[in-house]
Image (tube, helix red, strand yellow):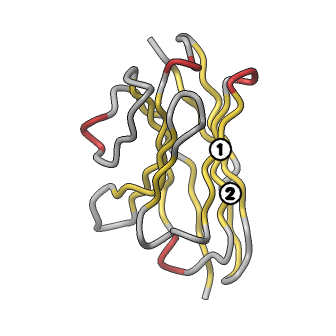
Amino acid sequence: QVQLVESGGGLVQVGDSLRLSCAASGGTFSNYAMGWFRQAPGKERAFVAAITWSGGGDSYADSVMGRFLISRNNAENTVYLRMNSLKPEDSAVYYCAASPYGTNLYTKWDEYDYWGQGTQVTVSR
């Protein structure tokens, strides 16, 4: 079974940047499509970004498009989320997710099979 571990979250101020990392093990990482989701208190888990197994395609939520960048390094079994120009509404627990159907992009939480434990991002006002 694929194991995913997120890291890189923290407390930042409005306008700051962070890079989240998701380290994968226990599966063939290069065959998996990967995604990032986030969940703020009192809200549903929401799509942030997704990337195909090859890294050749990606997708972003409208709320983060132009500010966030998803990337992956298959040799390192790691997917990243670079977050720029952070806003208070970006505050959430960020989750990494994996799907074995690596050639597609997925934007719904129930389209993914594996999840990490989450990493907290807090953007102060």
120, above or below 123, in the image: above
| 54 or 76, nearer to the observer | 54
Mark 2 or 1 closer to N-term?
1
Residue located 41% across and 70% down the image: 62
Percent x, y for residue 72? Answer: 66, 36
Mark toward the viewer: 2 or 1: 1
| 56 or 16, nearer to the observer | 56
Disc 2, SS: strand
Q: Is residue 21 left or right of residue 92?
A: right
Q: Residue furthest bottom?
A: 125
Q: Which mark is residue 82?
A: 2
Kind of residue sitting beneath label 2: Arg
Disc 1, SS: strand
Percent x, y for residue 24? Answer: 60, 24
Q: Classify 10 Å Cα crowding around label 1: few (below 14), some (14-19), many (20 and above).
A: many
Q: Are marks 2 and 1 in contact (CB under 8 Å)?
A: yes
Percent x, y for residue 11? Answer: 68, 68
Q: Which residue is mark 1?
A: 71
74, above or below 44, in the image: above
Q: Quadrant of the N terminus?
A: top left
Kind of residue sitting beneath label 1: Ser
